[in-house]
Image (spheres, rainbow, N blue to C red):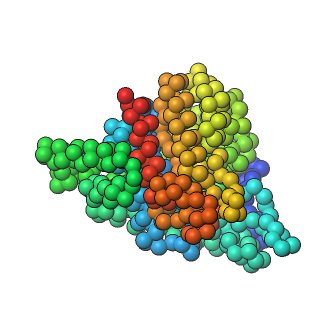
Amino acid sequence: MEKKWSKNTWRDYRIRQQPFYEDSVNLKIVESKINKLPPLIFAGEVRSLKEKLKKVAMGEAFLLQGGDCAESFSDFSANNLRDSFKVILQMSAVLTYASSLPVVKVGRIAGQFAKPRSDDFEEKNGLKLPSYRGDIINDINFDINSRKPDPKRMLDAYSQSAYSLNLIRAFASGGFADLEKVHNWNLDFVKKSTKNKYLDLANSITDALKFMKACGFNKENVPEFKQVDFFTSHEALLLNYEEALTREDSMKGGWYDCSAHMLWIGERTRNLDEAHVEFMRGIKNPIGVKIGPSVDEDYLIKLLEILNPLNEMGKITLITRMGSENIYSKLPLLIQKIRKNKNNVIWSCDPMHANTYKSSTGFKTRSFDKILSEIEAFFKVHQQEGSFAGGIHLELTGLDVTECVGGSQKIKEEDLSDRYHTHCDPRLNASQGLDLAFKLSDFLKVKRG
């Protein structure tokens, strides 16, 4: 018999990756305030996303999930948000044409404030302080007051998420997402690129748009030409915040975490008998699960039985983060196990986390070529296994940062210090993200062919 669930039963379980709040009274006050605030998203939007993800699960759509590694309070601005939204639209346009499939666009936006850490403490010059866990918990500055977890930061995270969602909805429906405009942005990128193959693809898209207009399909009579559906996601890590924004749908029933349309559970917090899995099993939102090379096939089946007992299509996205070498040896076994057990899942690739290293100049970075290599391995394995490579999950920004080496800009390790602004892990910049989309088009054509 399934154990009774409520949005606070996670508090009866062991929990990892959580801050220690010294002022428990103030914590309860903040939780109570958030519990009374309006939801950030609505149950109907979640159901709409789930319907689109069903198409991905059936091989009839592709999932593009991307955005900041860790959103910050200090870097928040309308321009930064616009630029990140813009690069996801640009990538989506290329991937849609290459795959002949609709692309489901999900941002790591409006809630990605908490980050798991390898160590609870950080030490510099003999001073040992709590690790930075994201702006929703503490501050990145290395001093005692900044690193002390402060529950009031959850209210700031809520406010910034609300501002972000308001602007995103305006961008998505107010003309900024006009397909012709997006394509012109891509043409500008291609003109600056040395890749002739990119120009061929861009010209093909131009011809396709001209053909559709000649047939009478344009933004005046086809809404999809000038607006898009765009959804938000983040790692459901700080459960005090997630619980406070979990609401029962008054129309159709069921509990929804109204902090984002989609939530995911990380490698460090997906133990079967612990708090994060307990919380996630009760919400109706689509759920992502990060899985690395150490995951056991039998364990994964047990986890899916807990998180998706009805085997609902579009509910679970398995996000692999393994490195290209491990994908070839590990992923086929997982695919075979999932197929044998008849679990409905979406397979997505996170090529970022297994490819992080410390550069010779001391900066944590990632190689564009390694990222591309892992994605290529992901597609090849799925093609060999006869399964559908359904999506990619990227840490990227619309800003012109220098945090990952390589790409069409040919960023070198000695260039990293120029514009290294991340609060946590290195991100692809706008040019690298679009560069990746054009290169991905080859893999998607193989899938389609």
Q: Is residue 13 visible?
A: yes
Q: Is residue 302 visible?
A: no
How many discs appear?
0
Q: Nearer the viewer, residue 408 or 240?
A: 408
Q: Position of residue 179 (x, y in %)?
A: 28, 54
In screen coordinates, is 322 left or right of 79?
Answer: right
Q: Is residue 324 above or below residue 195?
A: above
Name the residue at 31% across, 55% down: 187
In screen coordinates, is 326 left or right of 254?
Answer: right
Q: Is residue 201 above or below residue 107?
A: above
Q: Is residue 139 above or below residue 70?
A: below
Q: Is residue 395 above or below residue 401?
A: above
Q: Position of residue 99 (x, y in %)?
A: 37, 38
Q: Position of residue 256 (x, y in %)?
A: 52, 51
In the rendered image, the residue lying farthest to the top is: 340
Q: Nearer the viewer, residue 392 or 22?
A: 392
Locate the N terminus by quadrant: top right
Name the residue at 53% across, 65% down: 401
Locate the C terminus by quadrant: top left
In screen coordinates, is 363 left or right of 172?
Answer: right
Name the residue at 58% across, 59% down: 412
Q: Quadrant of residue 61?
A: top left
Name the residue at 57% across, 70% down: 418
Q: Position of residue 318 (x, y in %)?
A: 57, 39
In screen coordinates, is 116 left or right of 428?
Answer: right
